[in-house]
Amino acid sequence: MQFIQIGSLAVSLKWLLLGIALVLGLLTIKLWLKQTQENEIHKKVLDLIANTLFLGFFVWKGSLVILEPSLVIKSPMSLLYFTGGTHGLIIATLSASFYFVYKSRRMNLSNLFILQSGIMFIFSVIGGYYFMAFWLFPVQSTFHLVFSICSILIVGFILFKHDPKEAIEVVKKILAITVLAGLIGWLAYDRFVAPTEAEKTVQKSNPVDQSVEIGIQEGNRAPNFQLKNLEGDEVALNDLKGKKVILNLWATWCPPCKAEMPHMQEFYQEQKGKDVEILAVNLTTAEKNPNGVGQFVKDYGLTFPVVLDTAGAVGDAYQAFTIPTSYFIDRNGIIQKRIVGPMDKGMMTELINSID
């Protein structure tokens, strides 16, 4: 799965595309309303759609309470950092649709107008999303292209039914905006997400090839280290070769680390017996009370290995300047992905499954 790093947050590319597509939908509906409605109705409907989107976003965030109540109870800050994912999006879409229809009826808008507005917005979003997906997700490129063309044709048909000449002009603008968004998305993908030639070479190389450079970049062999766990036993990263590893660098005082830990524990429990391991490196030199790490692990019920970086050497070597910082390492010890910021259970699962 593909993610784009924005500051201290890793954002799924599909959610980023959805956000851009929603903006395209707003622009499309604004053009349509401007061409077909009086100024007063135009503003009211546009405000209604904007309010509907805000409501949908908050429902999407809050749906985590319904979908993962135990995680929210363990870590209320999950609501700040995470969403309800795809299932939450379905709940948010249904809630937003109900709100839009209800408010539209209160504004005494005709059923036909409500239907046209909804179809215009929905298919504008779908068309924009799948057009950008056509550029960025080559695995299903034909499906994405057909879906985007069909959606844009439906939008064009509704416009054409009102005024053919105006429809042609509006469709031209929609296509221009969509193409521009697709190109910007493709450039962003090429710059921030697509693997470099060096990384492609490493991914295709012999699993036992020892010539791979040691480093902390994606495609490098992860530097080995050896630290003591809470029981005083030595644990080395190289001991985990043959397993997929999430190397997580964290501290007890870090709010996003606290939000992430219950998700990490549930992920760890679900992955038992699947040759997946988590190695959590506590940045002990950054702790105000190093002796409190054990109590933190007990309070959060963590059962995956936790080791103490008492000298700060591992934190420095892996450049954990912003925490949590996590490295996804394949069975051969090669770093496949670096994520800065908190991850939820679904994100960990998708990333670990993307590693061969």
Image (spheres, grey):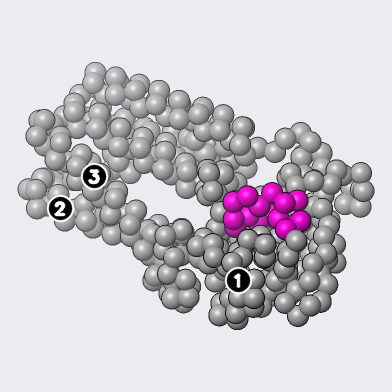
| Residue picked out by circle 3 | 49
Q: Residue at x 49, y 35 (%)?
A: 132
Which SS class for mark 2? Answer: helix
For the point 59% across and 67% down, the residue is 288
- Badge 3 element: helix
Along the line of sight, which residue is nearer the eye, 305 or 218?
A: 305
Q: Is 231 placed left or right of 148 in the picture? A: right
Out of 126 and 4, give the one closest to the viewer.
4
Specify the amino acid type for callout 2: Lys
Nearer to me, 222 or 115: 222
Q: Which residue is mark 1?
A: 289
Tell whether position 296 is magenta: no
Residues packed near mark 3 inside 10 Å, few (<14), some (14 to 19) or many (20 plus): many
| Residue range highlighted in magenta | 312-328
Question: What amino acid is labelled 3 in the image?
Answer: Ile
Q: CA distance from mark 2 to mark 1?
A: 54 Å
Q: Dividing the picture into quarters, in which one does residue 354 lie?
A: bottom right
- In the rendering, at what x and y percent does residue 46 appear? 20, 39
Q: Is tag 3's residue or tag 2's residue first in the polypeptide sequence? A: 3
Q: Nearer the viewer, mark 1 or mark 3?
A: 1
Q: Depth check: 265 or 66 in front?
A: 265
Could you tell me how far apart the alpha carbons at marks 1 and 3 are, in whole angstroms?
50 Å
Q: Which residue is mark 2?
A: 103
Q: Is residue 313 magenta?
A: yes
Per the image, label 1 sits on a secondary structure element best described as loop
- Quarter of the figure with residue 20: top left
Instruction: Say which residue appears at 72% left-offset and 73% top-offset.
Output: 305
Against 208, residue 237 (above or below) is below
Q: Is residue 277 above or below residue 222?
A: below
